Each structure stands twice: as structure tokens, then as C-alpha cells.
Amino acid sequence: MNLRTIFAIAVFVVAALGLRAEFSADSVVASVAADPKNAAAIVADVVETHPKLLAQIVSATVTAFPRQAVGIVRALLKADPDRATEIVRAAILAQPKLAAKITAAATATLPDQAEEITKAALAATPEELRSSVLAAAGDDNSGSSRGSTGGTSNSSTFPAQPINPDLVSPSS
């Protein structure tokens, strides 16, 4: 390698380290603003790359994009279920009015952690909104508990019907 190649590599490494050091939640918001349809995927990817900035990234993106808050929370919960309470807490602190929707989505996404998620959601939710969070968590928990028995009760309500091969088109 000649001197120019070594110098170019050194400049690239220094620039890359400098960009990495200047990373912020604002840059994530800018990335999401450029491609809002993929907000959840962008945020999940960035949090995977920078896990220490989870709370800051969740807070910034949920504040900037409240209509996509539930999708962002779902994507993060699927990407990192071990940090579910931290994700829910940060999202609710950023958008308290969405606490019920965020809690319902989180408990539906991770039903085995519903109790911990509900506790974290209640701790982060303002007093006047806690009843809606409890209602959302209660509705979802009752739905998930019905899931195992729902198949048997639905089978009596909606009996299986045979498919007549003469009525089914091969092109469909």
C-alpha cells in the first residue's frame, strides 16, 4: 500500500468515529421524517445498533411521530422483548395521552410479560389516565386468556363446513 491509500483509510476511520460520536436521537427523527412509512423499522434498527440510547430514541420518535407511536413500540418490543418495560415507560412518558393504546399494543405483542408491562405503564402514566390504562390492559389480558379456550368455544359457534370441490374454482 502506498502512502495515499494509508492516508485515505486513516481519514475514513477518523470520520467514521467522529460521526459515531455525534449520533443523537435527532438524527433518528430526521431519518424517520425522510421515510415515515418505515418509521418502526428505522427506529428498531437504530436501537439495535445503539442500545444505550433506547429511552432517548423512543422518547424523541414517539414525540415527533405520535401517529406511529404504537407501531414503533411494537417493532421495538419484537426486536428486544427483554427491555419491554423500559420501552413502554419511555413511550408513555413521551406521549401520556397514548398510554392506553401503547399498553394494549405492548401486552398484545408480549402477552407473557403483560403484568410487568402493565405495572411499568401505570408507573409512567399520569393519575388521571390510569383508569384507561387499566381498562386497556384488562381488555387485552381477558382476550389473551380466552385465546386458549377460544378455539373450542368458537368451534361450536361456527361448525366446520365441508368444501364442495365442484364449487371451488381451480383458478382462485
Image (cartoon, rainbow, N blue to C red):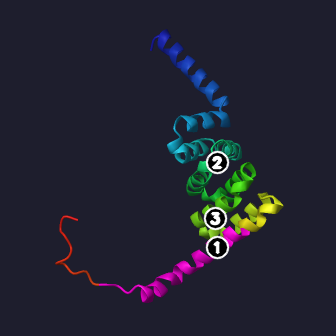
Q: Secondary structure at mark 3?
A: helix
Type of the residue with mark 1: Asp
Q: Secondary structure at mark 1?
A: helix
Locate the N terminus by quadrant.
Answer: top left
From this viewpoint, is residue 24 visible?
no
N-terminal of the two: label 1 or label 2? 2
Q: Circle 2 sits on which residue?
A: 66
Please provide the residue range marked out in magenta. 134-161
Q: Circle 1 sits on which residue?
A: 139
Predominant secondary structure, magenta span = helix
Residue at 64% across, 73% down: 139
Type of the residue with mark 2: Pro
Q: Circle 3 sits on which residue?
A: 104
145 is within the stretch colored magenta = yes
The disc placed on residue 44 is none
Query: What residue occupies the far top of the structure in this picture?
Result: 3
